[in-house]
Amino acid sequence: MAVKLTKNELKLQKDRLKQFERYLPTLMLKKQQLQLVIQQIEREIEEHKQKQAALIAQVKTWIAVYAENERYDLLSIVQIDTILKSRSN
């Protein structure tokens, strides 16, 4: 992006810089908040995966009782479809 060397362009660039410096802290805070939410969601996903593994282990013991564990691939049968998350004030 070429910058013109005029007074009007200088004023325009200074105004843009002021605007950037004004909103940058807010944007950085929002970025940090979003990163925290992403980390929280990743932890929740990991917890759900662990619960899924535990449930699969429980189901495998019952399938073993009926001697059908070779017929079914439980990982293809039992999957997390969606994770619903809501937040209210």
Image (cartoon, helix red, strand yellow):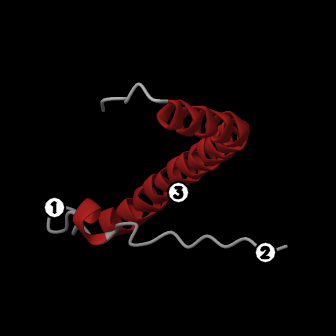
Q: What residue is shown with label 2?
A: 88
Q: Is residue 26 left or right of residue 8?
A: right
Between marks 2 and 3, how big is the CA–CA gap? 22 Å
Give amino acid for label 1: Glu
| Secondary structure under the numbered disc 3 in the rendered image | helix
Between marks 2 and 1, how big is the CA–CA gap? 45 Å
Q: What residue is shown with label 3?
A: 48
Instruction: Answer few, some or many: residues within 10 Å of disc 3's Cα (few below 14, many 20 plus, some between 14 and 19).
Output: some
Of labels 2 and 3, earlier in sequence is 3
Eyeballing the image, is 69 above or below 13? Answer: below
Of labels 2 and 1, earlier in sequence is 1
Give amino acid for label 2: Ser
Of labels 3 and 1, earlier in sequence is 3
The label shown at residue 70 is: 1
| Secondary structure under the numbered disc 1 in the rendered image | loop
Residue 26: give x, y in percent of width and height: 72, 43
